[in-house]
Image (cartoon, grey):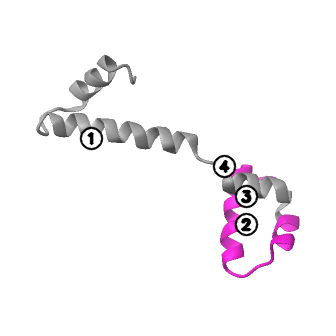
């Protein structure tokens, strides 16, 4: 299978495993090694973690200013605290 990233392939394999298919047959059919599969399943999503932290800071700024700050003011506050 030449389409999709390794992460997408691992996600497909994970879904099919939950439906009862055996791992060794899925790996062979999709063309992913066992080590790659486990690596992709277990690695943390760095971008998602960063976005989660940023979202918490944005909410804090928004609530601190009584829900009156819009995009421009929040962006300016993020620049002041050197997040962006």
Identify the residue under disc 3: 9
- Up-down relation of residue 70 to residue 27 (above or below): above
Estimate the spatial distance between the alpha carbons at disc 4 and disc 1, rounded to whole Å. 27 Å
Q: Residue at x 32, y 24 (%)?
A: 78
Residue 77's disc is none
Q: Are marks 3 and 2 in contact (CB under 8 Å)?
A: yes
Mark in the foreground, 1 or 3: 1
- Tell me the distance, in whole angstroms, between the alpha carbons under discs 1 and 3: 35 Å
* Sequence-earlier tag: 4 or 1: 4
Q: Which residue is mark 4?
A: 43
Q: Nearer the viewer, residue 4 or 48?
A: 48
> Mark 4 to mark 2: distance in Å?
15 Å
| Residue that appears at 57% across and 40% down | 46
Q: Earlier in the sequence, mark 2 or mark 1?
A: 2
Q: Is residue 60 left or right of residue 11?
A: left
Instruction: Give the answer, above or below, for where 7 lies relative to 22.
Output: above
Label 4: state its secondary structure: loop
Label 3 SS: helix
Q: Pointer 2: what residue?
A: 13
Which one is in front in this view, the residue at disc 4 or the one at disc 3? 4
Q: Which residue is mark 1?
A: 59
Element class at badge 2: helix
Q: Which one is earlier in the sequence, the residue at label 1 or at label 3? A: 3
Quadrant of the snapshot with the N terminus: bottom right
Residue in front for this viewpoint, 7 or 52:
52
Q: Is residue 54 left or right of residue 9?
A: left
At which x and y percent is residue 4?
72, 52
**Residue that appears at 24% across and 25% down:** 72
* Label 4, label 3: how far apart the Cα atoms are: 14 Å
Q: CA distance from mark 2 to mark 1?
A: 36 Å
Q: Which residues are magenta?
A: 1-29
User: Vertically, is 66 above or below 35?
Assistant: above
């Amino acid at each position: 299978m030449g389409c999709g990233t390794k992460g997408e392939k691992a996600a497909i394999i994970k879904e099919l495993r939950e439906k009862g298919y055996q791992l060794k047959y899925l790996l062979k059919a999709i063309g992913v090694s066992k080590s790659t599969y486990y690596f992709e399943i277990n690695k943390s999503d760095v971008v998602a973690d960063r976005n989660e932290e940023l979202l918490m800071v944005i909410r804090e700024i928004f609530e601190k200013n009584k829900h009156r700050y819009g995009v421009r003011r929040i962006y300016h506050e993020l620049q002041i605290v050197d997040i962006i």
